[in-house]
C-alpha cells in the first residue's frame, strides 16, 4: 500500500493518469451522446410510443421527425380543400444546431404569413374587391410559389376579376402540377380548358391569315427586301444576347458586314456571332428545302453554331451530365436514343398534321429538354424552330432579348407539363415578326384578274386575343 501511495504521490504519475482518463472520456463521450440522441429520436417517433411521452418536453421540436408540417390545418384558417401534408424537412439525424432551427423557424413564419394572405385574399374576393384580392394573393404567391391552394385562388381572382381565362387556366395547371388531385383546380381547369383551346385555335387561324397576306407581298418589293436584311441582323443579335452576349446591335452588324473585331469584346462573343451567321446561311442554302429530317441535320446545325466557338464539341453530343437551373436533363448515355426519338417524332404523320407553329414550338422544347450538347442548345433549338416555320411559309421568328424572362418562364411551364404557354409565346413572337415585315413593306394586295393594286391592311388580332396572349 505504501509503495502504491508513494507512486501516485509523484506529480508526473498523476499527470499521466489524468491524461489517460481524459483520453478515454474524449473517445467514449461522442458514442454515448449519439446513443442517447438516437434513443430519444426513436422514442419520440416510433408509432407505438405512448402519446404522453411524445408530447412531453423530452420530445422537443428539435428531435421530431415530421417537424413543422406545412398543412392548411392552421388555427386561424380552415381550408375546405385539403391537400397532402408538405414537410419542410424530414430529420434523418438529430441536429439541434441554432442555425438550422432559425432556418426552420423562418420557413414556418413564411408559411404562416402566406396562409394569412390567402385567407385575406379569399375574403376580399368574396366581398367583390378583386383589385385588392389580386394584390394580396400575389403577395401570398411570392411567399409560397408552389402551393396549389394559393395558385388556385390566384386563378379564381384572375378569372373572375380580369376575365382572363387563359392566364387562369395556366394557374390551375400549375396548381395541378404540384397536386394532381386538387379538387378545385381540377374542376376549374376542366371548365376553362375548352374555352382556352378555342381561343388558341382562333389565334392560330389569325396568324395563318396574316401569313397569307405576307406571302402576297412581292419578294421583289424593295421595302420588304430591306426589312429582311435588317431582320437578319436583328435575329443574330437577339439570339446571342439571350445567351448573355454583350454586343450591341450596331456592333453585331459591324462584325457581320466588315469582319472587323470590336475593341473591348471577347473573342468568344465575336465567334458566337460568326457561328450564328454561318448556321443561318447553312439553313437558308440547304436544310430549309428538305422534307425529311435526319439526326445529321441537327448535328450539322449545331456544328455551324459552335464551329467558331469550340470546334471540338461542335456537332458532337455531350459526354457528361449537365445541370440546368430548373431541371436536370437526361444522362449523357441516353442522349443519342432520345434524339433519335425526337427525329422520329418530327417525321411522323401526327407531327406533320400539327399546326406548324405548334410543331415548331414543341420541337424547340423537345431539344432543350434533352439538352444534347455541352453548349449551344438554345441557339440550335431556336434555329430548328425557325427551320420548321420557314418550311411552312413563315419568316424566321425573332425572340427579342427583352422577352427573355417570358421565354424562360414559359419553358419552365413546359417542364411542369403545360406546353400551351410556350406555344402561345412563340405564336406572339411569330405575330410580331410578321407584323414587322408587313409594316415595313408595301401593303398592296395585287389582284391577278384586274392587275390593280388596292391598299389593304393585314389581318388584326382581336383586342381580347392580344390581352389573353
Image: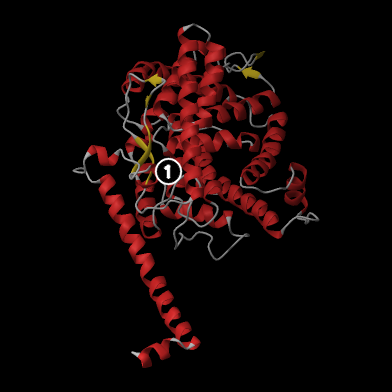
Count residues near mark 1 (Cα–Cα under 10 Å), then give few for <14, some for 14-19, many for 20+.
some
The residue indicated by pointer 1 is 366
Instruction: State the image coordinates of residue 88 (x, y, percent, origin top left).
Output: 41, 40
In this view, which residue lies farthest toward the bottom?
Answer: 3
Instruction: State the image coordinates of residue 292 (x, y, percent, origin top left).
Output: 40, 45
**Please, what secondary structure does the residue beneath circle 1 have?**
helix
Quarter holding the N terminus is bottom left
Instruction: State the image coordinates of residue 39 (x, y, percent, origin top left).
Output: 28, 54
Instruction: State the image coordinates of residue 38 (x, y, percent, origin top left).
Output: 30, 56
Rendering colour mode: secondary structure
Picture residue at 42% right of the left edge, 47% below the top = 293
Q: Is residue 353 visible?
A: no
In this view, which residue lies farthest toward the left?
Answer: 48
In this view, which residue lies farthest toward the top?
Answer: 127
**In the image, is 465 to the left or to the right of 229?**
left
Quarter holding residue 25? bottom left
Looking at this view, is 290 or 308 the one in front? 308
**In the image, is 94 to the left or to the right of 385?**
left
**In the image, is 405 to the left or to the right of 177?**
right
Looking at this view, is 140 or 421 the one in front? 140
In this view, which residue lies farthest toward the right?
Answer: 263
Picture residue at 64% right of the left edge, 53% below the top = 272
Q: Total marks drawn?
A: 1
On screen, residue 359 above or below 457 = below
Looking at this view, is 435 or 372 the one in front? 372
Looking at this view, is 181 or 124 the one in front? 124
Picture residue at 51% right of the left edge, 57% below the top = 374
Q: Is residue 34 visible?
A: yes
On screen, residue 324 above or below 125 = below
Amino acid at each position: 500500500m505504501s509503495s502504491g501511495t508513494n507512486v501516485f504521490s509523484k506529480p508526473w504519475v498523476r499527470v499521466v493518469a489524468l491524461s489517460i482518463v481524459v483520453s478515454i472520456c474524449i473517445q467514449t463521450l461522442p458514442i454515448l451522446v449519439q446513443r442517447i440522441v438516437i434513443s430519444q429520436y426513436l422514442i419520440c417517433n416510433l408509432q407505438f410510443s405512448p402519446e404522453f411521452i411524445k408530447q412531453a418536453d423530452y420530445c422537443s421540436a428539435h428531435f421530431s421527425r415530421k417537424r413543422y408540417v406545412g398543412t392548411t390545418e392552421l388555427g386561424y384558417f380552415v381550408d375546405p380543400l385539403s391537400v397532402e401534408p408538405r414537410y419542410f424537412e424530414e430529420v434523418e439525424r438529430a441536429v439541434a444546431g441554432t442555425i438550422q432551427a432559425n432556418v426552420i423557424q423562418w420557413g414556418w413564419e413564411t408559411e404562416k404569413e402566406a396562409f394569412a394572405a390567402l385567407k385575406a385574399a379569399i375574403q376580399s374576393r368574396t366581398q367583390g374587391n378583386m383589385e385588392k384580392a389580386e394584390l394580396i394573393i400575389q403577395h401570398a404567391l411570392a411567399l409560397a410559389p408552389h402551393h396549389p391552394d394559393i395558385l388556385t385562388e390566384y386563378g379564381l381572382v384572375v378569372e373572375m376579376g380580369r376575365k382572363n381565362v387563359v392566364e387562369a387556366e395556366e394557374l390551375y395547371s400549375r396548381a395541378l402540377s404540384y397536386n394532381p388531385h386538387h379538387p378545385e383546380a381540377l374542376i376549374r381547369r376542366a371548365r376553362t380548358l375548352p374555352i382556352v383551346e378555342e381561343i388558341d385555335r382562333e389565334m392560330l387561324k389569325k396568324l395563318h391569315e396574316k401569313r397569307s397576306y405576307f406571302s402576297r407581298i412581292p419578294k421583289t418589293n424593295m421595302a420588304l427586301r430591306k426589312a429582311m436584311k435588317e431582320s437578319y441582323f436583328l435575329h443574330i443579335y437577339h439570339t446571342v444576347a439571350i445567351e448573355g452576349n454583350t454586343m450591341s446591335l450596331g456592333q453585331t452588324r459591324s462584325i457581320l458586314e466588315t469582319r472587323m473585331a470590336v475593341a473591348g469584346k471577347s473573342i468568344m462573343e465575336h465567334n458566337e456571332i460568326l457561328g450564328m451567321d454561318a448556321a443561318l446561311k447553312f439553313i437558308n442554302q440547304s436544310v430549309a428545302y428538305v422534307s425529311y429530317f435526319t439526326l445529321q441535320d441537327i448535328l450539322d446545325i449545331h456544328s455551324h453554331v459552335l464551329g467558331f466557338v469550340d470546334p471540338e464539341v461542335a456537332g458532337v453530343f455531350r459526354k457528361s451530365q449537365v445541370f440546368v437551373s430548373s431541371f436536370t436533363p437526361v444522362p449523357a448515355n441516353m442522349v443519342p436514343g432520345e434524339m433519335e426519338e425526337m427525329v422520329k417524332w418530327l417525321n411522323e404523320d401526327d407531327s406533320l398534321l400539327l399546326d406548324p407553329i405548334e410543331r415548331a414550338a414543341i420541337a424547340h422544347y423537345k431539344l432543350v429538354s434533352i439538352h444534347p450538347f455541352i453548349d449551344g442548345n438554345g441557339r440550335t433549338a431556336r434555329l430548328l424552330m425557325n427551320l420548321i416555320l420557314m418550311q411552312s411559309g413563315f419568316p424566321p421568328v425573332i425572340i427579342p432579348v427583352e422577352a427573355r424572362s417570358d421565354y424562360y418562364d414559359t419553358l419552365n411551364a413546359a417542364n411542369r407539363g403545360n406546353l400551351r404557354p410556350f406555344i402561345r409565346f412563340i405564336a406572339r413572337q411569330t405575330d410580331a415578326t410578321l407584323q414587322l415585315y408587313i409594316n415595313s413593306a408595301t401593303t398592296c394586295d395585287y389582284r391577278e384578274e384586274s392587275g390593280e393594286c388596292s391598299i389593304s391592311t393585314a389581318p388584326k388580332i382581336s383586342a381580347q386575343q392580344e390581352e389573353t396572349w
